[in-house]
Image (tube, rainbow, N blue to C red):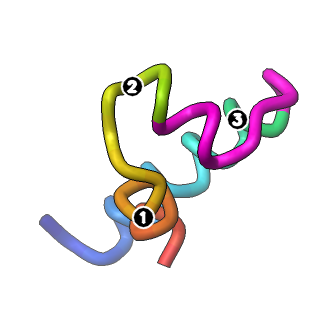
Amino acid sequence: MGEKFTSRVGYLIRNFRIASDMTQKELADKCGLNESTIRNYWK
């Protein structure tokens, strides 16, 4: 996938997480993922 798409997905995840008042760790736990996976979406 293109870099533009990946950046957009990361942006949407971050905004959802912040609007939900969640840390990256909390979101990762809810999704069944590692915190590093969530962090990598924002790169």
In the rendered structure, are the residues bearing label 2 and label 1 in contact, judged by CB atoms less than 8 Å apart? no
Disc 2/disc 1 C-alpha distance (Å):
12 Å
Residue located at (48% from left, 20% from top)? 30
In the picture of the structure, the residue carrying the numbered disc 2 is 31
Where residue 6 appears, as percent x and y from the top left, is: 34, 63
Q: Is residue 13 left or right of residue 18?
A: left
| Magenta segment | 19-28
Position of the N terminus by quadrant: bottom left
Magenta stretch secondary structure, dominant: helix
Percent position of residue 35, x then y = 47, 54
Q: Residue at x 80, y 22 (%)?
A: 20
Kindly state the secondary structure of the residue where label 3 is placed.
helix
Query: What type is the residue that disc 2 sits on?
Result: Cys
Is 26 in front, or is 14?
26
Judging by the rendered image, the residue that carries numbered circle 3 is 17
Indicate the amino acid at tag 1: Ser
